[in-house]
Each structure stands twice: as C-alpha cells, then as structure tokens.
Image (cartoon, rainbow, N blue to C red):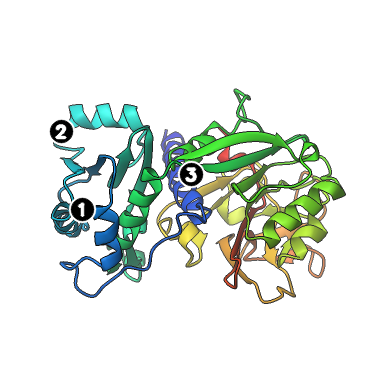
Amino acid sequence: MKLRRWIARLNLAATLALVGALFILVNFLASRRYSRLDVTRNHLATLSEKTVQVLTHLTEPVSIVVFYQRSASLHGMVTDLLKEYERHTSRLTIEYVDPLQDRARAEQLAKQFEIDRLNLLIVQAGSRHKYLSDTDLAEYDYAAVGFGEAPTVKTFKGEDALTSAILSVTQAHQSLVWITRGHGEKTTEQDVGGIDELQKAFERENMQVESVALLEKPEIPQEVNVVVMPGPTRRVMEQELAALQSYLDRGGRLLALIDPLQETGLDDFLSRWGVELGHDMVVDPARQLPFVSAANVFVTTYTRHPVVEHMETLMTLFPLARSVQPAKETGGLTVTQLALTSEQGWGETTTQDTTFTFAEGTDRKGPVSLAVAVERTTPPPVRLVVIGDSDFVTN
C-alpha cells in the first residue's frame, strides 16, 4: 500500500512538472514578433509611456481574468497594476476569480480555457487569448526552498509581461508552429504516445499548430515561430537540415526531442549549435521507479534557467533518455544545462544490455545532463531547446 501511494504521488508530481514545463517552455520559445517589452520601472504605480500608448490606442475590447488565490504572493501587486491600466482605457474589462472561493466560476473558466493550474492571468481579445503565470510576472528567489519555505518575489515585472500580452492578443497575426513529420515522429493523431498536450500548450499561447513534412518545403518561412521535432526515429535528410540551418540563421526557434538508440542524422547539425547528443542511455539507480529499469529516470535537479525556473520542488519522469550536453566548442552561443541526474547517474554506452554497470572511461559520469537550452543574443537572436527524450511529453 505504501509503495502504491508513493508511485501515485510520483505520477502526480511528474504530471504537474510536465504541465509547468510545457507552459514555461512554450513561453521561452515564444514569438519573436511579440517579444517582451522592456518597460519595467522602479515605481509600480507609474506606467511607462509605452504601456500608456498601447492602452490609449486599443481598438477592441480586452478582458483580463485574474485567476488567483487572494493569498497568493502576487495578488496585491497584480491588483494595483491593473488599477493603473484601467485609468488609461475604457476598453479593459477585469474579472477577479479566486479558484478556492468561487468554485463554480473557476470550473467554468477551466473548461473554457483548458486551465490546468492556479494563479494565472488570462488576457483575451476576440478569439485570441494568452496566459501569464507567476514566473512571467515576477522573478523569484529560491534560496529558501531547500529549507521548506516558499520562494520570495525578487523582481516584479508585471507591466512588461502584461503589455506584451495585450499586444499579442490584439494583433491579427497568429504565431505559427510547425511540428515535423516524415521521420517517425510522434503525432497528435496517436491515442497512446501522442503529443496532444504539447500541441495544446502552444494553442493556449495563441499559436497555430501545423504538421509539416520538411521535404515538401524548399525553405522554412520566417513566419514560422517555432519548429518542433518530436522524437524522430529515422534520418533527417540533408535538404531538410539545410532548411533548418537557414531558418535558425535567420533567427528561428527549435524544440528538438531526440530519443536514445535512434540514428537521426542530427548529431553534426546540433553540434554546430553547441549541443552534443550522447550515444548512450541515461541510467540513475538513485532516481528510478521501483521494479523497473534504472533507465526509467526521474529528475529532481534543475539549473537556474527560465525553462525550469518553477520546477525546484517537482520531478519529471523520463522513461528512456539519452544525455544532452553543451558541446566542447559552442561558438559564442550560450548553452545551459537544464535537468540533471544525481551523482549516482551515468550515460550507459552498452545499450544492448538489460543490466547496467558503470564503466570508467567509457560511460559518461554523473551528474548527467538530459536537456539544454541554446541562446544567441546577437541579432538575429536564436533559441533552441534540445531534450534527450520525447516520451515525457506524450499523452
């Protein structure tokens, strides 16, 4: 009974981690067109000139739902900020909903907007809407989390995030996401092992999702905001790699989920972007589920990066993963490890065996990285996220 309860808690935590990870991941790979505005000021009561200009030039109604517990740390700051916004436009409608106090309305909103977490702002104009989470609205200090205390707000950046969201939903242009097919990738049509949740995460951010075979496209247009490669099992052709390279050179975004034991032809391509794919399988006896292979790893160690900023107390289950490391030569790119095994983990290179033993000098010693984020800040800016597993985002 205790084991069953432990596994149930682990599954719940893994689900929460997935929801949070997808939310932040999508924002990290968000549209270049609506990049965040630098409007943060020292005095919260005074809006920037840019925000006032956006509000006074609104041509359609905008509604904001404050889906927050009144006890949440940001509730007061958000309320004060929205009062200032209301002073500058009559086209703004604001509704405050405490999910714990008004359960009927909360359930209605959860169904309408597919809300799966607390403490959000929902910004809507017409059929377009965008979510803002705590980590969009503030930077947090997590120093005390390890001692059982809640993170504290370090910097409130609500005006920056909210004005950008209003711009996003009031523009006719809809961000476009391409999910690749033709190499055995996971699809949204699969009942088991599909990627519906990943597609929903993009759609919640007002992004249009299309399934595309890159071989049928001579180039990836700049209107495509993110390209997703969800678990290819066959080689990507040189023509397709050239299209991806050109797209990224022009400031594209790529999410690559690359499983172990697959020859995808992406090794050299990703190496040019500062990423090394391990020819191994990540094993961690200290982070495995009971009675299953040590290659079924759950991760509780994350670095400081926006993609995993909210996940310090959560765990993510990677049923089968390869190592993904910063390459030795990154060419001026910023490559950040995101999720790590414990020190007892390693990258097992003898992948045909069903039992695993660390081989000094052959296997990669832990902690082992399973995911990295790549950023190029010089114009045009580029962002990639490469994860050594695709199963963790499946239905």
With 186 as the anchor, is 171 left or right in this view?
A: left
With 129 as the anchor, is 221 left or right in this view?
A: right
Total residue callouts: 3
Q: Quadrant of residue 375?
A: bottom right
- Circles 2 and 3, Cβ within 8 Å, touching? The answer is no
Q: Can you say whether 12 is above or below 310 in the image?
A: above
Instruction: Identify the amino acid type marked 1.
Output: Ala
Residue position for label 1:
72
Quick one: SS at disc 2?
loop
Badge 3: residue crowd in 10 Å (few <14, some 14–19, many ≥20): many
Pointer 2 or 1: first along the chain: 1
Q: What percent of the width, then of the height, locates residue 14?
A: 47, 43
Between the C-alphas of marks 2 and 3, the distance is 26 Å
With 196 as the anchor, is 250 left or right in this view?
A: right
Residue reaching furthest to the right: 238
Residue position for label 2:
102
Q: Quadrant of residue 392?
A: top right
Quarter of the image with the C terminus is top right
The residue at 47%/37% (across/down) is 203
Instruction: Identify the amino acid type marked 3.
Output: Leu
Residue position for label 3:
18
Quick one: SS at disc 1?
loop
- Circles 2 and 1, Cβ within 8 Å, touching? The answer is no
**In the depicted view, which residue is nearer to us: 128 or 317?**
128
Q: What percent of the width, then of the height, locates residue 160?
A: 33, 62
Between the C-alphas of marks 1 and 3, the distance is 22 Å
**In the depicted view, which residue is nearer to us: 160 or 271?**
160
**In the depicted view, which residue is nearer to us: 6 or 388?**
388
Q: Quadrant of residue 210?
A: top right
